[in-house]
Amino acid sequence: MRMSGPYHLELVAKDKEIVLYVMDHANSKLSAEGGSGKATIQTGKDKTRTSVKLEQAGDNILKGTGDFSIKPETV
């Protein structure tokens, strides 16, 4: 979880899927209506990068899928 301006953003990643929860500083849900974003996943020793488009998937959720896997060295 990270603060970004007036938001708390919680990123949950698993193989081929990223979910971003948007909340305020009191951890109350904030609407993600009309929201979008992009996540860049970097993996492996060669630092392969994959971009994933995030789109609204619920009240306070942005979600995206892509061809990537999560490993201990993933950033």
Image (tube, grey):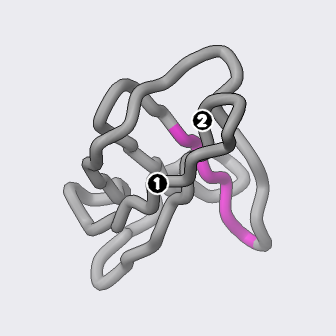
Does the magenta portion include 65? no
Q: Give the prevailing secondary structure in the magenta stretch.
A: strand
Q: Is residue 3 left or right of residue 54?
A: right
Tell me the residue at 38%/69% (across/down): 31
Q: Quadrant of residue 6?
A: bottom right
Residue 43: quadrant of the picture: top right
Quadrant for the N terminus in the image: top right
- Label 1: element kind: strand
Mark positioned earlier in the residue sequence (1 or 2): 2
Residue 9 image offset from top left, x and y in percent: 61, 52
57 and 39: which is toward the camera: 39
Outermost residue, top direction? 72
User: Residue at point 72% right, 53% down?
Assistant: 25
In the picture, measured across the screen, residue 57 lies left or right of residue 10, that is left
| Residue 47 point in image, percent of width and height | 67, 43
Q: Residue furthest bottom?
A: 34
Which residue carries the number 1 mark? Answer: 50
Q: Which residue sits at x=35%, y=64%?
A: 54
Which of 28/49 is in front?
Answer: 49
The residue segment tinted magenta is 6-11
- CA distance for labels 1 and 2: 8 Å
Q: Secondary structure at mark 2?
A: strand
Dots 1, 2 in contact, CB < 8 A: yes
